[in-house]
Image: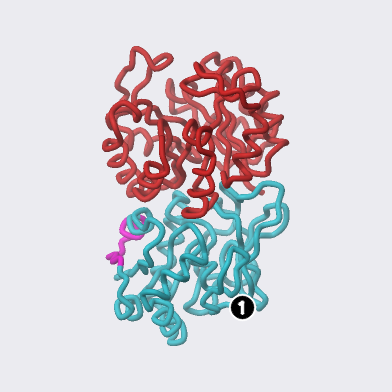
Chain colours: A cyan, B red
Amino acid sequence: MRVVLADYGAGNLRSVSSAFARAGAEVEISADPGTVGSAPLAVIAGVGHAGAALAGLETRGLDEALRERAAAGRPLLGICVGMQLLFEESDEGGAGLGLFKGPVKRLQARRVPHMGWNALRLEGEVPLLDGLAGADVYFAHSYSVRPTEDLPRAEVDHDGPVVAAVQRGALAGVQFHPERSAQAGARLLENVMAWSRSA
Amino acid sequence: MVKKRLIPCLDVTGGRVVKGIRFENLRDMGDPIELATRYSELGADELVFLDITATVFGHDPIVELIERAAEELQIPFTVGGGVSSLEQARTLLRAGADKVAVNRAAVEAPELLSQLAEEFGAQAVVCAIDSKAGEVVTHGGRTPRGIDTVEWAQEAVRRGAGEILLTSIEADGTREGYDLELTRAVSEAVSVPVIASGGAGTVAHLAEAFEAGAEAALVATIVHENPERIPSIKQELKEAGWPIRI
């Protein structure tokens, strides 16, 4: 199936793009709002600064395209900073797309960034994480989402619970890096594509 | 809880993995991506590519290597070795490296760390510190910098480093264990993860580094001699009670 990665001018998309290709996707990287808006599955990926990322989306008109596709129930996945962008105000600076309710806060833990492999604990029905309960996936982040609405999710423990994934209908986000999470990451991408086909 | 990491370090030059003693008598060990993939399949948690000749031959082979690694590897990787400027570090990260390790360039221009963190996030910025008798050294240990290692680690983190790769020059190559006193002092002084480096010879040495506060252990010789040991090393650590990804 066709997967479009939103190119907002920051972050290297090579590894995410290759991981989707390995999972069988036909991947396109695009900064065109029409292409991003109409893709069977759109993905916001990338690392770096949440404020800069949102500015990059806005400059290209991608923020509207993403809001519209979310409103229309077309599948959208945010990865790492891309997940944070689905939420609201970030401690790192700037608002998010506000598709999920809740802020993005700096992690409170003995070691920040939260760096390395951590095991997923499922809270509720998260079809995206089918077969991944207890699986170790790779994290590298200093900020995390704090949902203020009741969302099916997965958490990991890093001196307290950290939200690792959320999903509501066709809208989902993962804080970890599936493209760097070995077999567990590959499984997630396969799940995402299966979920997009059925959404 | 986050798992303790085992991180093999591959020395590369001219696009090939090499092995030698103190950068001499280098022997060709093969294609970096093939070896890296093998390590990944055997359970390495992360990898470091150290370009041991970057300052001599320029950066083209390493950029090409990073692009291939970004496409083909399914675990994270750090690139370091001779990164001399913001522009070079940026080139490596833009090519697809998950993290870049800066050493001497950061000692000479600490603002480099903040600039990189601002642009790519602290999680992409590793400050590599070589230490000898508690003092920061560069040029493979030959140049003392007159800076206390613990103080420099703290400053590096204040400036934006998201991880410290801490190498004891005295322990490096001895296979007699990590410098635990140094590892403990730096781990207690900073809030970012510390990767212990230099001196690993046995599984017990890795456990000692974790005990001293390291979040990860860099390994070279003990896995290069026999990569098939990776699963048993991790299994032993897990059985000893450490949180390890199997």
Element at label 1: loop
Q: Position of residue B29 (x, y in %)?
A: 32, 24
Indicate whether B74 appears above or below A178: above
Q: Is residue A24 on the magenta stretch?
A: yes
Q: Position of residue B241 (x, y in %)?
A: 69, 36
Residue A52 or residue A199, whichever sits in front:
A52
Query: Seen in the image, is B42 located left or right of residue B208?
Result: left
Residue A125 or residue A103, whichever sits in front:
A103
Q: Quadrant of residue A63?
A: bottom left
For the view shown, which residue lies furthest in the bottom direction? A72
Chain where mark 1 sits: A
Residue A1 or residue B5, whichever sits in front:
B5
Q: Position of residue B66 (x, y in %)?
A: 34, 42
**Residue at position x 27%, y 38% in the image:** B60
Q: Which residue is mark 1?
A: A101
Q: Amino acid at mark 1?
A: Lys
Q: Quadrant of the C terminus of chain B?
A: top right
Indicate whether B193 appears above or below B182: below
Classify 10 Å Cα crowding around label 1: few (below 14), some (14-19), many (20 and above): some
Magenta stretch? A19-29
Q: Quadrant of residue A98?
A: bottom right
Q: Position of residue A12 (x, y in %)?
A: 38, 55
Residue A123 or residue A29, whichever sits in front:
A29
**Residue at position x 35%, y 60% in the image:** A20
Query: Seen in the image, is A143 located left or right of residue A51?
Result: right
Exactly how many numbered labels are in the figure?
1
**Residue at position x 37%, y 30% in the image:** B51
Indicate whether A84 appears above or below A118: below
Q: Is residue B219 on the magenta stretch?
A: no
